[in-house]
Image (tube, grey):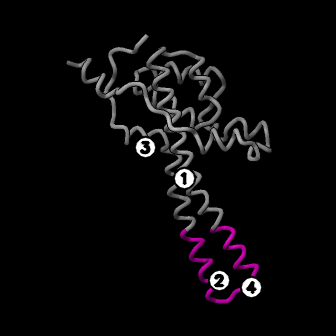
Amino acid sequence: MKISPLPFQPHPILSYLRVGKILYYSLTLFILESWVYWIFLERAWINQSSVWIVGIWGIYFLFSFVHIFLVIADGWSRYQNYKRAKDLFYDHGYRPRIARLYMSSKCQRNAALEAAKELGIMPEVQEYYKNNGVKWYHFLPYFMVQDPFFFIKSSFWNRTFLEKQYRPKYNYRKIQLELSI
């Protein structure tokens, strides 16, 4: 069951930015935060502050700086989720089973919702999430609440930051142009 007609299909770069918009807001904050901590670290070093003061600013800086790369990797992974979700929704139409695959985190839901929006089935996916108790303020992934030791599991790292590249089956912009002629 292919979805037809297709709504307007944005450029892939625009889709990439829309899928990870929350992540890219936080990326901006981590860049600014790293810059501020670097200034404090540099001042502490130049003023020959105690090892504790230099160490604290160094830890703050490293925490923020490392998060820059984690957010970039997370954004990449969510874009892979988006491409896969879009192919699945296009092939099968709206299916609760597909929407459920992307329900565990806000970023994954955003990826599925953006894919659904571009295929014209966003209201159904939103309704599914609403009926399953997902609220707008559910930012923390559900697995983080259920398992406090999530960060030592390889499945967390693979699914959050190291998602394999997914090549879409279809060129949606080309299909949309062909169907509109």
Q: Amino acid at mark 2?
A: Ala
Judged left or right of residue 62, residue 36 is left
Question: Within 10 Å of the Cα at label 2, are there few (<14), some (14-19), or many (20+) other Cα atoms?
Answer: some
Name the secondary structure under disc 1. helix
On screen, residue 22 above or below 84: below
Q: Position of residue 165 (x, y in %)?
A: 51, 38
Circle nearer the N terminus (4, 2): 2
Task: Check disc 3 and report the residue beneath it.
Answer: 17
Alpha carbon distance from label 3 to label 1: 13 Å
Alpha carbon distance from label 1 to label 4: 31 Å
Residue drawn at the location 37% of the way across and 38% of the way down: 12
Alpha carbon distance from label 3 to label 4: 43 Å
Circle nearer the N terminus (3, 4): 3
Name the secondary structure under disc 4. loop
Tag shown at residue 50: 4
Q: Amino acid at mark 4?
A: Ser
Give the residue furthest to the bottom: 47
Q: Amino acid at mark 3?
A: Leu
On screen, residue 71 above or below 36: above
Q: Is residue 43 magenta?
A: yes
On screen, residue 99 above or below 139: above
Circle nearer the N terminus (2, 3): 3
Residue drawn at the location 56% of the way across and 71% of the way down: 36
Q: Are marks 2 and 3 in contact (CB under 8 Å)?
A: no
Question: Within 10 Å of the Cα at label 1, are there few (<14), some (14-19), or many (20+) other Cα atoms?
Answer: some
Q: In the picture, residue 2 is in which quadrant?
A: top left
Task: Check disc 2 and report the residue beneath it.
Answer: 44
Question: Within 10 Å of the Cα at label 3, are there few (<14), some (14-19), or many (20+) other Cα atoms?
Answer: some
Q: Specify start and end residues of the magenta stretch as a single range.
A: 35-61
